[in-house]
Amino acid sequence: MLKQLRLVFLTMMTMTAVLPLAAQVRHVTTVNPMSKHSYDEVYEYDYVDIQPQFPGGERGLINFINKTREYPYHAYKKRIEGRVLCSFIVGTDGRVGDVRVIRGAGDESLNREALRVIGEMPKWSVGKVGNHAVPVRVVLPINFRL
């Protein structure tokens, strides 16, 4: 009987020690930003305490994209439309980097233009976990419609 009580007590103590740790799990990936030997941890957008934000918020981001985006001449003449799904990392200093096309629009000129627009973005407010600035991956669609 004493062994059973001890086992129940140890099981309960283990569960109370493990449950708070489970709540702290975050989706973190590693990125190799240009070196074969250096990997950085990057947090996913939905798994940080404070998400990075474009200056002016979502409305400011839409306005920036609409002002900066130029429809490629080749795609315009051929009436090509589409959406380019891009990802980029907002660093701990707010700069945008590691810009990539996740899913292209089917026309390379639209993909290049989406990369150019994201590359010209100003600094964002940084993402945070607790009180620490962390690099955060952001996924953003860029639409091309005539």
Image (cartoon, grey):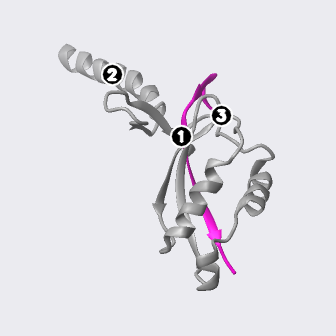
Residue interval drawn in magenta: 126-146
Question: Measuring 65% from the left and 34% from the top, which residue is drawn there?
Answer: 94
Give the crowd class for mark 2: few <14, some 14-19, many >=20 residues within 10 Å: few
Question: Measuring 52% from the left and 52% from the top, which residue is drawn there?
Answer: 87
Q: Is 69 one of the magenta-colored residues?
A: no
Numbered disc in front, either 2 or 3: 3
Question: Measuring 61% from the left and 55% from the top, which residue is drawn there?
Answer: 116
Q: Which mark is residue 14?
A: 2
State the image coordinates of residue 125 (x, y, percent, origin top left): 71, 35
Of pointers 1 and 2, the one earlier in the residue sequence: 2
Numbered disc in front, either 1 or 3: 3
| Number of callouts | 3
Q: Identify the element where label 1 is drawn.
A: helix
State the image coordinates of residue 72 (x, y, percent, origin top left): 63, 71
Q: Is 136 one of the magenta-colored residues?
A: yes
State the image coordinates of residue 86 (x, y, percent, origin top left): 53, 57
Q: Is residue 51 above or below residue 142?
A: above
**Mark 1–mark 3 distance (CA, rounded to whole Å):** 17 Å
Q: Identify the element where label 2 is drawn.
A: helix
**Residue type at the position of mark 3:** Gly
State the image coordinates of residue 11 (x, y, percent, origin top left): 29, 24
Q: Return the residue at label 3.
A: 94
Q: Main secondary structure of the magenta part?
A: strand
State left or right for residue 101 relative to residue 71.
left
